Image: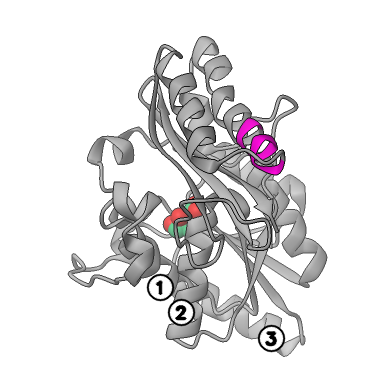
Amino acid sequence: MKVLKTPQEWAKVRIEILAGGQSIGFVPTMGALHVGHMELVKASLKKCDFTIVSIFVNPTQFNNPKDFETYPKTLENDLKLLKESGVHAVFAPSTKTMYPTESEMALSFGSLENVLEGKYRPGHFSGVGLVVSKLFNLVKPQTAFFGQKDLQQIAVIKRLVADLSFQIQIEVVPTKREADGLAYSSRNVRLSDAERKTALILFDSLSKAKKELLDGQEWFAVRQNIEKDFQSSADTKLEYFDLVHPESFKLYSSFDSSQKSSICVAANVGDVRLIDNLPVID
Ligand code: PAF
C-alpha cells in the first residue's frame, strides 16, 4: 500500500494507473477508521480496480473548535487496517498542503443550510464542500463512496457534483450498525461504558418512531413522545428529531406514505454529539 503525502506523489501514481486502464475508487475519510468506513472500502474494492483512501481531519468543517481538538486521531492504526483490507493507496496530506493559505472561500447549499446539520452546525457544509472539492480535484477518481449515516452530507455532495460538474459517480453505502443497533461512528470511542449504553437511545427512538408512523400515528404525537423519552434519559440532550425528504431535506410536518421520507436525529450523549437516521419510505 502506498502512503502519499502530497498531490504530486499521487499524480505520478495516478498516471501509471490510468495508463494500465484501471478505474479509481475513492473513499474520503477523516481517519479514526471503524467498521463503517471499512464497508465503504469494501464497496470501492469491489467496484473499482484501484482504491485510494484519504485521511485528513478537515479544520474548516468544524464549527466548534473543541470538537476539532477532541476528534480522535489514530493514523498508525488506520494505516494498518487499510493495508490489511487490500487498499492500494492512502492520501494523507498535511493541513499546510490542503490549505497553503487560510481559505476565505465559503460555499452555500441553499435550503440544505437551514435545517438539521446545516442549521445546528453553521459553516459545517461550507467546509465539507470546500475540502471535498479540493480532494476531488486532486484525486480525480471515477467513483467516490460515502456512508448513508451522513445523509445530509450526501445531499450536499450530490449538489456539489451537479453544480460544479465533477465527472465523478457518487456511491452511497448503507449505515453499518453494531449488534444492538448503534451506528458506527468515529465519535463512539469517546463514549464511556455508561454513555455507550445510553447512546442506544438514538437508534431506539428512530426505530420506535418509524414503527409508530407505519402503524398510522401522527408525526406530531410521535415526535412529542420521543422528545419526552430524551428528557427523561439522564446525560442526553436532543438537538433535533425531524422527518425529512431524504434528498431535498424538505421538513415534513406530517407523514405521507406516498412520499419518500427519513427520520434524522442529532443528540449529545455526555459531551459527545452523535447523529443517525432511518429511512421510513425509500
Ligand atoms: O464524512 C467525513 O468523514 C467528512 O465529512 C469528509 C467527507 C471526509 C470530508 O472531510
Q: Say if residue 264 shows up in the picture.
A: yes
Q: Which residue is mark 1?
A: 134
Question: Is residue 210 part of the magenta span, yes or no?
Answer: yes
In primary-sequence order, the first of circles 3 and 1 is 3
Instruction: Relative to 243, say whether 230 is above or below.
Output: above
| Location of mark 3 (residue) | 18
Query: Does residue 107 show up magenta in the picture?
Result: no
Who is closer to the viewer here, 184 or 93? 184
Residue at the disc numbered 2 = 137
Q: Are marks 1 and 2 in contact (CB under 8 Å)?
A: yes
The first of marks 2 and 3 along the sequence is 3
Bounds of the magenta segment? 208-214
260 above or below 17? above
Contact check, label 2 and label 3, Cβ < 8 Å: no
Q: Please state the horizontal and vertical placement of residue 84, each as a whole percent of the image.
A: 75, 45
Q: Amino acid at mark 2?
A: Asn
